[in-house]
Image (cartoon, rainbow, N blue to C red):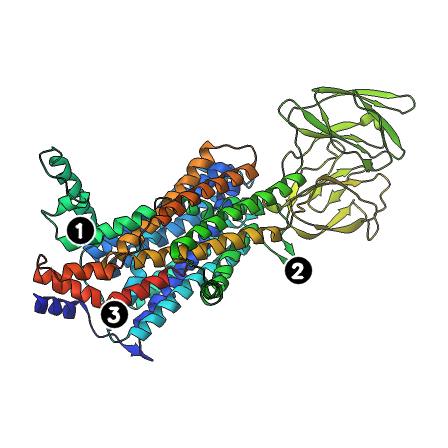
Amino acid sequence: MADRRENDDKRTKSKSAECCGYPVSIFFIVVNEFCERFSYYGMRAVLVLYFRYFLRWDDDLATSIYHAFVALCYLTPILGAIVADSWLGKFKTIIYLSIVYAIGQIVMAVSAINDITDANRDGTPDNMAVHVTLAMIGLILIAFGTGGIKPCVSAFGGDQFADHQTRQRSTFFSVFYLCINAGSLLSTLITPILRGQECGIHTQQKCYPLAFGVPAALMVVSLIVFIAGSGMYIKAAPQGNIMLDVCNCIGFAIKNRFRHRSKRYPKREHWLDWANEKYNKLLIAQIKMVLKVLFLYIPLPMFWTLFDQKGSRWTFQATTMDGTFGTLILQPDQMQTVNPILILTLVPIMDRVVYPLIRKCGFNFSPLKRMTVGMFLAAMAFVSAALVQIQIDKTLPVFPSSTESQLKIVNMASSQMEVTISPHDPIVLGSMQASDYMTLPNSTITVSLNTNPPIIKMFPLSERQRHTLIIPADPNTAYVTFDITSKPEQGSNAIRFVNGMSEEVNVSYYGFNRQSPVSDYVFLSQGEHTFSISNSVKSCTFSKMFRFGAAYTFLIPSTLNLTDNCGASVVEVEDIKPNTVHMALQIPQYFLITAGEVVFSVTGLEFSYSQAPSNMKAVLQAGWLFTVAVGNFIVLIVAELAKLPDQWAEYVLFASLLVAVCIIFSIMAYFYTYINPAEIEAQFMQGDEIDPEDKEKKAIELKSKDFVQQQNEQVGKTKM
């Protein structure tokens, strides 16, 4: 039997060409992984903003769909591993699912082209259902593609090395996972910049097609590179999947126990012992060890519930903040790059400084204690996020409720004006001055102007709306305008002009006439913009530096002299203040959540692998990924059901839940007894109840345990 197995290995493996002691094939695999990770994280970085500002979903729905997608990405690796190990093999699985993946990325890029349904060319898709359908199809394909190849690529790379190439194999895994982090870092820097550009066939919009198109192109490149190395790969035949054996054994034990539920059957020490009739004792003992670790996984999804919100809620939070870092302008979705930067910094610091220092101080900082600390740090990150949100809320404008309206008064007359609006006290405004917004409960107001003779006029107001009462050079022609009633989206600035001159003028891309002295709002990005005011004869220019998220009304006085620079004459009225809370205030929460990730995730995987048999690593990997998926489903449920009025309260809720789970986990950890799987397996290896073939197979597995352990410890030190 052993000879036949050896011959099978010779048929499925061939000698791979080498360069500098390394198989040439691994260079294709490393490039493939970098491109694929760039594609995935680049698309994911801008995804929640695409939902919010292109598909026009509200924050809760955008958050829910984002986390449903992430959850699916962490469920499909289980399917990919089963398909690769039991049916197609790793090579074909990577090829087929990469094709699905690339198609999904292309479909996502197409879904972001608003011109395909913008028949009237107004910049807004006429049939949003088409874009939503394409986006959902694309995301499902991406989830099956990225999840399906996740467990295959690193293992396929490990297959390329011979048994004597342990040093080269170790170097490969280090470079491999460095490429994962490099792809994540670069993509979360670049794709938000691409999204911030303006593009379009008929109208200029935020360039989501480019932000999704570049990751799609990288995925196509990834597929081409992987196929290019096809002739050099060592392609191991499918050997069966241990997860299926585990599930079958557990299922048989449950069914057998149910069939023998009568009291006349003697009890067995463990419920899994009811599988003794069909499965050998070694496999049952291994499954018992795995289930002991999986039991500790029960509280873990709550950590991922908080952790993955840095790509959704925290990104939305950044859109209401000031991203100016000196001469560098940071996009809201670029703040996510803080995470991979801190990972690359904190992992070696923890391994070489913090943990050794704790050991020297005599503290027993066991793996489960580290994981508890990691969960607590994540909870503190959300406390920090709540404090930042409270500061943001203080700077946000208060808009009228469903039974109120708001009114601002602007005096463009040449003299001082006293304005009375019952029941408020009179307001005195100088020429070209504006009042603050006042909240009014009435749908109709009576305005009194202290002119000679006095002017009394009535104006209707709309509920839940902001208005401006504009008093022009001739107060008898006073009128009311509708103002913007929400913070400008994506950090842009809402700009409009009011023409107080007696003649028609053009302001850059605005046009005025006597029937419409007020322009519509136009949205401009952060930075300096120059405006040109002109009539049929003369013109003048002025510039304005804009920040993030403000709204302005520029007043053109009746006495404006169209000279070279008229900036001093044009009056700026601030309708909505710009974002004043700086994005740098998010750095502490990113530091805490990343420190929590390093302490929790890295330690958790290393602990899990140390407590389970070497041939059960895939089962634990599947269980770990399943906790990530469940954590994202929890976000989905809370976002749809909690409906808390304040975002800071939701952050506190999540932090409180994780603290509670942290306490439960610490109690579970206190009663956990560490084991040595190798010793337990050795006890069964010495018994006679195992078939000789199984014993030989197990001996081979134990011999390769060091390699498996080394490989999986590398997994724990990277982004999943």
Is residue 479 placed above or below 499 in the rendered structure? above
> Looking at numbered disc 3 in the image, what kind of residue is underneath it?
Gly
Q: CA distance from mark 2 to mark 3?
A: 49 Å
Instruction: Please tell me which residue lies in front, 507 or 258.
Output: 258
Q: Is residue 241 above or below residue 416?
A: below
Please state the horizontal and vertical placement of residue 120, each as a whole percent of the image: 53, 38
Q: Which residue is mark 3?
A: 231
SS for tag 1? helix
What residue sits right under mark 1 in the picture? 284
Q: From the viewer's perspective, is 422 left or right of 346?
A: right
Query: Which of the marked residues, 1 or 2, is nearer the chain's N terminus?
Result: 1
Residue 170 sits in quarter: bottom left
Whole-number angstrom distance, CA of label 1 to CA of label 2:
62 Å
- Residue 199: image x %, image y %? 55, 51
Residue that appears at 31% across and 61% down: 153
| Amino acid at circle 1 | Ile
Q: Secondary structure at mark 3?
A: helix
Residue 139 seen in the current view: no
Q: Are marks 1 and 2 in contact (CB under 8 Å)?
A: no
Is residue 183 visible to us here?
A: yes
Quadrant hosting residue 122: top right
Q: Earlier in the sequence, mark 2 or mark 3?
A: 3
Residue 327 shows which numbered tag? Answer: 2
Residue 518 placement, left or right of 204? right
Point out residue 452 in the picture as x, y percentages from the top left corner.
92, 23
Residue plotted at (77% across, 46% down) = 533
**Amino acid, disc 2:** Thr
Q: Earlier in the sequence, mark 3 or mark 1?
A: 3
